[in-house]
Image (cartoon, coloured by chain):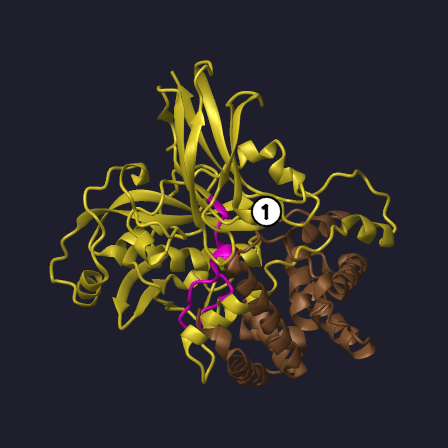
Amino acid sequence: MQGGREVWSADDALERLYAAHWRRLVRLSVLLVRDVPTAEEVVQDAFVAVHARWSRLRDPDLALAYLRQTVVNRSRSALRHRAVVTRHAERSVPAYASGADEEVTASSRRDAVLDAMRELPRRQREVLALRYYLDLSEAEIADTLGISRGAVKSHASRGSAALRDRLRDQWED
Amino acid sequence: MTEPHTPGSRPDDDTRLAALLSDAVSDVEPREALDSIRNRTKVTPLSARRPWTYAVGGAVVATAAVIGAIAFAGDQLGLTGSDDTTPAASHRPRHTPTKAVTSPDQNATASSAPSASPVTTSSTLAGYYLGDTPQGPRLYREFDRVEATDPVDGALQLLVADPHDPDYSTPWKPGDLTDGVLKDGVVDVVVDSSLAQRPAGMTEQYAREAVQQVVYTVQAAVQSRVPVHFSLDTVLGVDTSEPVANAPVLDTLSHVSLTSPSEGQVVDNGKLAVEGVANSFEANVVVRVQRYEGTEIVAQEPFTAEAWMGDKLFPFSGTIDLSGVPAGRYLVMAMTDDPSGGTEGSGAFTDTRTITIP
């Protein structure tokens, strides 16, 4: 299944990286910026950037690391430079079966989690998203954010405590 | 998760946090953007082909995800992704079990206090193996019978054995994973030191799945969500300096698994009983029966799983009428629902079985 590494063209790389990571990276960005259209734009920009840089990356793993980093950085810029309107209506919430209380609860729980993430300090939010959504290791998070592993640890620990605090109602199933 | 334990928080909290974050964005289905990205990279579009047509088109037969029967012993804990409580006949694994898995208590005793002359018993355990999906390598499950001194030993044996399905693979070879011991709620596993780094040609995702393969298989064997503590700080380049917990089900397993029919089953009464587990959009699962050779579809039925939200797989079942279908070999394919019809980033998960109509 994992044959020898073949050489991909920039277009091949774009297509494959897109197929494998587009949705997940948009979701990552949603955790950071809260807003789906903004997240889509951020991640599109990141894919354009990785395509342009492919001749220097030439490796799917490096490319993925670069994509992640670009998504985090651009999500940060998007927040900084734009007043992001939290548009619940923009979130592509699937049509729920009517009267499905469980789904309504799930929906409000999602909103609560996204809101709580937005209220965290930026670094904590980034560390939590990379760690708990992308399952990155401390070292990978440190590389992605350009901070020390110790800083990753402390942001993770404070962030998860803060999130737990804010989400006390959602914590237990 | 590679480092499930954050100082100052409990592993449970980490698991819950991962579940909450995953769930919070689980309904985000971004618009298709490959074409607009391509336009911006000023590349002449070579074709309108979507990348996932590799997986959901004709190739799906080749990558057919055939896994063993479901949750023979592990389901009462939801370990194998199903909430149903291991009902009888149709949940029979491909090999008749000679001995049920022992209870967790017995496991703990057997593992932590091995006798001087270990006695092996035969039991049927679930082994997880890597298989391709539209979202990259994911874990599929097979059942097999092993002669083992205890469930952890059995799990390690499965991990280093070749899966029955040629579409699956395992990166572990005999000798790679040894001396598994369940003690104090953690399973210790000794990993051959040559496996610390990720080999060239193996993707990071594959490596992470391979580590989770060990975690899921061990947990299914001992029937408890115990973390796995590897003897190396990194395994295949994945940070394993702390005990590794199971990653979220939907990020790790294939989203659909057929329990029944079993591979090679003969259907001679015109009725195909179908059972499985899935997590699919609005709980929709489509099961299709087509000629093994060629593409002619002889039956197709929609099924509804018991639920679809949440980080697990839900049971579905039903019967497909095959009366009047000519004799021959057929492929049964269960598919998750892809509401975008392949225009969004994921594409459908599939699981397949070959059956014979005499």
Q: Which residue is found at the position 57% from the left and 50% from the top?
A: B136
Colour assignment, chain A: brown
Left or right of residue A85: residue B220: left
Q: x%, y% of residue B253?
A: 48, 52
Q: x%, y% of residue A89?
A: 72, 63
Left or right of residue B39: residue B357: left
Q: Which residue is found at the position 48% from the left and 66% from the top?
A: B1
Give whichever of B276, A147 is nearer the camera: B276
Q: Say if A40 sits above or below A83 in the image.
A: above
| Residue reaching furthest to the front | A99
Is A64 a magenta residue? no
- The residue that mark 1 highlights is A4
Colour assignment, chain B: yellow
Q: x%, y% of residue A100?
A: 53, 56
- Element at label 1: loop
- Residue range in magenta is B236-256
Name the chain under label 1.
A
